[in-house]
């Protein structure tokens, strides 16, 4: 009987000490409950203010993309952090897609270079991707080391032709090919000194007047942005057709539209135009269904373009993709508020 009591006591002690050992951790200073791992600080893309998985170790690419009616729909545009729409000869615009946080599997159709496109690439220290260019643009690239560029004419292995499309709108490249070029040529694959754009704080509303429709008129394209409150973004429509990314089949959703007014002059008999990308001028920001008037300035070609409101404060953007519309005197531009006036339904009582 005595032996049974001893054995029972040993079993109880074993159970007690076993339970305790599974639920405590020995740490300097004594035993205490194990704390769960701390959540890491969120990381945001400095160009879109959208969350990313971790620090972005990538290179910026600025790709010249065709934008005539035969070039649409383009590949990869929805993945760009910033998209420029710039005038070109014949008042037919081109796109410049700036990729940083994500570079898609198909980008195109890749088109030629112009001097003002090189100026924009220099502002971002981006690898400028193009196929040929105007005489002046190619001379600038050949004589200046300020802009790294990848020209398909001399580096065709990093591009391919999409046989389902007609030339010259069928030249494609990819993020994989662009990084392969950087490695093969010994160029940097990680961007340094990335600019942080200015964004609205959480819960902060834009300060502009109501304006939910923007209209831009080119020779062969009527571009309309309409604000959709349900998604807090703008839908882009060209010639009454939704503007889509051919790679995803999805429509483009734009968070911010900046109008950058510039002056242009005719450069040669081929219709090429020249723009001073440092002269400054009027600017408009459309975000959250509002418009703010302001100005833009740029100290020199190695400096960023700064957009400020009428009080001299830098424009504050909503998180997401931004389109910068560079508008000269040949592009029609207007905007309006189409929101219906509220109807007073109260009945007068006698």
Image: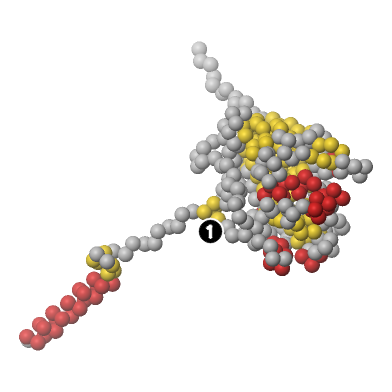
Question: Which residue occupies the extreme left position in the image?
Answer: 2
Q: Position of residue 349 (x, y in %)?
A: 51, 15
Tell me if mark 1 has few (under 14), some (14-19) or many (20+) residues whose alpha carbon lies within 10 angstroms of its own.
few
Location of residue 242 with respect to 156 vertically, above or below: above
How is the structure coloured here? secondary structure
Toward the viewer: 18 or 202? 202
Toward the viewer: 347 or 187? 187
Picture quadrant where residue 36 is located: bottom left
83 left or right of 114? left
Q: Is residue 30 visible?
A: yes
Toward the viewer: 196 or 107? 196
Tell me what residue is drawn at x 59 percent, y 44 percent. Answer: 197
177 left or right of 346? right
Q: Which residue in the protein does label 1 denote?
A: 54
Q: Position of residue 110 (x, y in %)?
A: 79, 56
Q: Position of residue 123 (x, y in %)?
A: 69, 47
Tell me what residue is drawn at x 66 percent, y 61 percent. Answer: 188
Toward the viewer: 251 or 63? 63
Q: Is residue 209 visible?
A: no
Q: Position of residue 209 (x, y in %)?
A: 61, 29
Tell me what residue is drawn at x 80 percent, y 44 percent. Answer: 93
Element carrying mark 1: loop
Tell me what residue is drawn at x 65 percent, y 30 percent. Answer: 293
112 left or right of 126? right
Which quadrant of the rendered structure holds the N terminus?
A: bottom left
Location of residue 342 with respect to 134 vertically, above or below: above
Tell me how many marks there are.
1
Picture quadrant where residue 267 is located: top right
Question: Which residue occupies the extreme right position in the image?
Answer: 269
């Amino acid at each position: 009987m005595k032996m049974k009591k001893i054995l029972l006591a040993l079993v109880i002690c074993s159970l007690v000490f076993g339970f305790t050992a599974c639920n405590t951790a020995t740490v300097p200073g004594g035993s205490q409950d194990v704390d769960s791992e701390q959540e890491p600080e969120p990381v945001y893309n400095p160009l879109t203010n959208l969350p990313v998985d971790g620090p972005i170790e990538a290179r910026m690419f600025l790709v010249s993309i065709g934008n005539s009616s035969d070039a649409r729909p383009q590949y990869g545009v929805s993945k760009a952090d910033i998209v420029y729409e710039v005038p070109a000869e014949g008042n037919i615009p081109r796109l410049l897609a700036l990729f940083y946080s994500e570079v898609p599997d198909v980008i195109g159709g890749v088109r030629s270079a112009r001097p003002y496109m090189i100026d924009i690439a220099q502002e971002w220290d981006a690898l400028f991707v193009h196929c040929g260019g105007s005489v002046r643009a190619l001379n600038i690239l050949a004589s200046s080391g300020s802009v790294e560029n990848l020209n398909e004419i001399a580096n065709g292995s990093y591009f391919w032709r999409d046989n389902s499309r007609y030339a010259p709108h069928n030249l494609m490249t990819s993020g994989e090919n662009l990084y392969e070029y950087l490695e093969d040529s010994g160029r940097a694959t990680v961007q340094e000194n990335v600019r942080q754009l200015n964004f609205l704080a959480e819960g902060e509303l834009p300060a502009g007047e109501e304006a939910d429709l923007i209209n831009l008129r080119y020779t062969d394209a009527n571009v309309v942005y309409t604000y959709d409150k349900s998604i807090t973004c703008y839908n882009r429509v060209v010639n009454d057709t939704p503007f889509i990314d051919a790679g995803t089949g999805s429509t483009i959703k734009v968070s911010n539209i900046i109008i950058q007014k510039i002056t242009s002059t005719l450069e040669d008999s081929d219709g090429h135009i020249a723009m001073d990308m440092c002269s400054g001028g009027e600017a408009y920001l459309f975000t959250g269904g509002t418009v703010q008037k302001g100005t833009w300035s740029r100290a020199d070609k190695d400096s960023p373009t700064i957009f400020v409101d009428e009080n001299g404060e830098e424009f504050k953007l909503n998180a997401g993709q931004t389109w910068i519309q560079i508008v000269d005197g040949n592009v029609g531009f207007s905007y309006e508020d189409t929101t219906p006036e509220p109807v007073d339904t109260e009945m007068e009582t006698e």
